[in-house]
Image: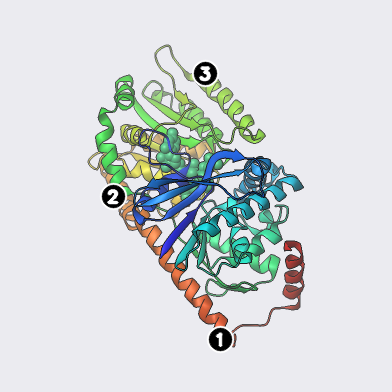
Amino acid sequence: MTLVVVSNRVARAKPNEPMTGGLAAALLPVVENSGAVWVGSSNRVRDGSQSEPFARIESLGKGALALLDLPAAHYGGYYEGFANSALWPALHSRPDLIRVSQDDYESYREVNSFVARALMRFSKPDTMFWVQDYHFLALGGQLRELGVEHPIGFFLHTPWAPHSVMASVPHHRALIESMLAYDLIGFQTEEDCGNFAGYLTLELGLPVKNGIVHSRFGLTRLAAFPIGINVDGFAAQAMRAASHPDVSRLRKSLHGERLAIGVDRLDYSKGLLNRIRAFDRLFEIQPSLKRTVSLLQIANPSRGAIEAYGNLQCELAQLVSDVNGRHGEVDWTPIRYLNKGFSQTTLAGFYRSAQVGVVTPLYDGMNLVAKEYVAAQNPVDPGVLVLSKFAGAANELTTALIVNPHDIDSMARALGMAFAMPLPERRLRWEAMMTKLQAGNIQNWFESFISALESAHEMGRAASEEPRADAESPSPGAVYQWQATSTALH
Ligand SMILES: O=P(O)(O)OC[C@H]1O[C@H](O[C@H]2O[C@H](CO)[C@@H](O)[C@H](O)[C@H]2O)[C@H](O)[C@@H](O)[C@@H]1O
Ligand SMILES: O=c1ccn([C@@H]2O[C@H](COP(=O)(O)OP(=O)(O)O)[C@@H](O)[C@H]2O)c(=O)[nH]1
């Protein structure tokens, strides 16, 4: 079997550079070891979308990276436009932030179709395609139109919002219906999977039974595959990182102060404003913590050309400056705020230096930082994770201090509890989280998706060869909606 993994963002194996997001960070170790070809954007564009797609091939572990120059005329409309100003806000339940045009949608489809054509070069008799994330909802359908009959799987790294929110995306029906060309659609959580099934039923009139849906493409299986990390690798990195210059400088600067750490892309989904407000409140309700604790907040700029991101950067800088101005002292800064990224090795050392990890998204597919913080702790003196109930990671890391990021007062109290938590409780909570992380590590995630994709494809083939005695006839509404959707597609 030859595996071809496709994502917009790919990672190159450069140990001293920051990872751009969790998708690239998570996939790198498993893709390197699998011998797969990983196809994605080169971060360069090229004129002429009708020309033969150009891929630069680099080696990556046992496999290869194929870097595509995406069409210049469509890149902005695809990435900043439809993917990150329509799909991303909707998937994170912020339909109020949707800002897209018809041109953006057309660019999104153009780029999907361009990538589909580029993939044909990697299509061999035993190829299996695994498409990643919301940038490529339409790719499976486009591969099928090009005649691909191989297994094609899809994994969504973000949440999937309830039907009423997803219905606010322009062209949602055509796009989501085309996703049924995938043999297997994987989600981070059962809730996301349920929301997707709800959309199919309510909007397209397609019933989902035992995680299976039948459509004009055949059979599609839906299931949750919570993504993990390389737990042992991260723990080992954290042990070694103490001598790293940035890590030792951080430790020396603390002078006995206890540290909380937050590490996020600068994104409105990450709950950064709420987090800073909770620290503000903490210093008001527990003034004894002034000068004894501080927050190191790494907020790596992301998608800066999009207005909502630029606005957030300004608002956050203003809030941090206000909180530091009000609570700070000549020799103490409550919030150390950095707009730059660090390598994962350095981050591992930072996590281990911090008594509290703060992960408070308003919505997050998984949030690997939460998992990395836990894996990096010293087993004899572990820190405490304060985790939003709206991060996918909260389904597994149930012994973290789970918070509601909209409730600033209770978040402030949870932060106070985290700093005060006695060692035996910290250890019990941490050990339970490590057990969960080990069980769902990245290798298991990778293998379980591939094996489920193989069986979903086989099941689909078998079903297509048999008359569907078990299938229910669709309701009249479903037939009508089906035709409407198909027209929109072609
Ligand atoms: O590629 P960018 O536009 O710079 O954004 C970075 C990535 O952000 C999102 O990451 C998601 O994937 C993580 C791993 O599964 C998950 O933990 C996190 O909750 C998600 O936000 C996005 O989905 C990726 O496509 C981006 O590459
Ligand atoms: O300065 C930084 C900030 C983050 N990361 C990595 O970026 C990923 C962020 O993934 P997460 O799932 O938390 O969020 P996303 O950014 O994908 O939404 C994690 O693996 C981090 O280790 C990094 O390498 N350097």
Say which quarter of the image contains residue 487.
bottom right
Q: Is residue 151 left or right of 146 when viewed as pictured?
A: left
Q: In which quarter of the image is the C terminus?
A: bottom right
Mark pair 2, 1: CA separation: 49 Å
Residue 65 x, y percent position in the rendering:
44, 48
Mark pair 3, 1: CA separation: 71 Å
Which secondary structure lies at badge 1? loop
Please, what is the three-letter code of the amino acid marked with disc 2?
Glu
Say which quarter of the image contains residue 126.
bottom left
Front residue (pair 488, 477)? 488
Cβ of mark 3 under 8 A from ligand 2:
no
Task: Nearest to the eye among marks 2 and 3: give it.
Answer: 2
Q: Which residue occupies 44% across, 43% down? A: 11
Please, what is the three-letter code of the amino acid marked with disc 3?
Arg
Q: Do the residues labelled 3 and 1 touch (CB within 8 Å)?
A: no
Please rate how many residues cluster around mark 3, counting C-alpha atoms within 10 Å: few if below 14, some from 14 to 19, many from 20. Answer: few
Which residue position holds label 2?
431
Mark pair 2, 3: CA separation: 38 Å
Q: Which residue occupies 35% across, 40% down? A: 384
Which residue position holds label 1?
466
Task: Nearest to the eye among marks 2 and 1: give it.
Answer: 1
Let me know if residue 193 appears in the view: yes
Q: Quadrant of the N terminus?
A: bottom left
Front residue (pair 410, 123)? 123
Which residue position holds label 3?
326
Please, what is the three-letter code of the amino acid marked with disc 1?
Glu
Q: Is residue 486 left or right of 158 when viewed as pictured?
A: right
- Residue lying farthest to the left in this orientation: 380
Please rate how many residues cluster around mark 1, counting C-alpha atoms within 10 Å: few if below 14, some from 14 to 19, many from 20. Answer: few
Q: Which of marks 2 and 3 is nearer the N terminus?
A: 3
